[in-house]
Amino acid sequence: MSDLTRLYYLLLVANASYLALTKSDNQVENYCHLCTRHTMCRYPFDDVSPNCKNIEHGDLDPEEIISIVNQHNLRRNFIASGKEIRGNPGPQPPAKNMMELSWDDELAVLARRWALQCVLSKDECRDVTRFQVWQNINILNIDTLEINTNSLNRIKLHIKTWSDDVQNFDSAEVGLVDFAEDNRGPYIGIAAGNITLVGCGRAIYSQGLRERGPSTMTSTSSSLSFSGSSAMASANPQAGTLKLKLARPRGNKSISSLVGDFNSVRGHRLEVLVCNYGGIDRTTPQNLYEDGMPGYCPEGLTNSPRYKYLCRELLLYNAFC
């Protein structure tokens, strides 16, 4: 049985657990102890928010989960290889210890709960007892896309948008990133070397979005994204002029595009993908990843058999043998 087939059946079990967890609120009290503004504390029930109009569905099926994990790892493998030449400035250095990502049920439940609120920004708190959590959000205006927009193609677009934020990233910052900063771009979630887990949630709806943020910029776009604790957006220019109140970019760096007041797209279907990543450490600035020979995995880790330049835990590797 191939690695991909094993992963598929493993995720079948994970997805069943993911759906079961969405129906249980036994952990709500624990989340409230982490912070009173925690998403699971504020929204203890797995209900669709009144903000969401004409919602279609939100659950990710096993094939979509596999695609999310694979697309993240393909992007991380490319960065680790040293082939990413983009940046502000670039190129990006290779990584010697970038970890392969795997799916996490708890992170997915939190992401799904926030996606079902249909709020056009990141949430305020989504940490878990195990670690602190990074968040990326991307929104597609489905009706303006000019390609085959089945769900797997849209997943690729979501993750590509985050990866393309590298064009705003200074390669010198690989040596020191403050994960507590309020205005980091979504590339951080794609490229952070020590992150090992990802869990995502999705919602598709038509209107009823709320806005937050101090400044307003405009662009023509069909996609926008937010990350970490920011309202920073990056997008692929396409049809439709949108406006959004968003945070200002750090220093004199530009934001590739910012979009907003979704009253201008009433009647259009929007798809939001929320992905949570663990774990991160906001207590002190640290390397985004270690610069060095790709795939140089430290003791206790082994090279991924599928993603040449990524590392994975030995226990995870043995589970596929």
Image: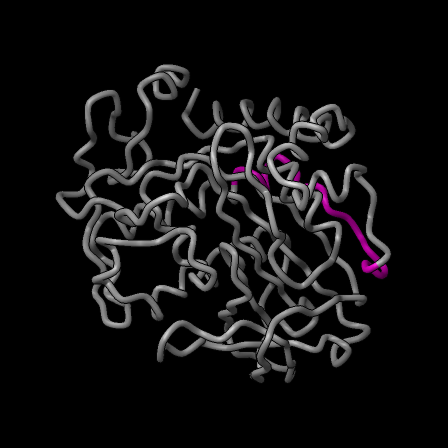
Q: Residue at x 73, y 32 (%)?
A: 22
Q: x%, y% of residue 40?
A: 70, 39
> Would residue 129 appear left or right of 301 to someone viewing this image?
right
Q: x%, y% of residue 242?
A: 65, 81
> Would residue 288 appear left or right of 50 to someone viewing this image?
left
Q: x%, y% of residue 66?
A: 52, 38
In this rendered view, identify the residue nearer to me: 153 or 260: 260
Q: Residue at x 50, y 42 (%)?
A: 133
Most distant residue in the left direction = 293
Q: Residue at x 45, y 47 (%)?
A: 71
Extent of the magenta region = 51-66
Q: Name which quarter of the figure residue 2 lies in.
A: top left
Q: Main secondary structure of the magenta part?
A: loop
> Would residue 318 appear left or right of 8 to someone viewing this image?
left
In this rendered view, identify the residue nearer to me: 285 or 103: 285
Quadrant occupied by the C terminus: top left
* The stretch drawn in magenta includes residue 62: yes
Quadrant occupied by the N terminus: top left
Q: x%, y% of residue 98?
A: 28, 40
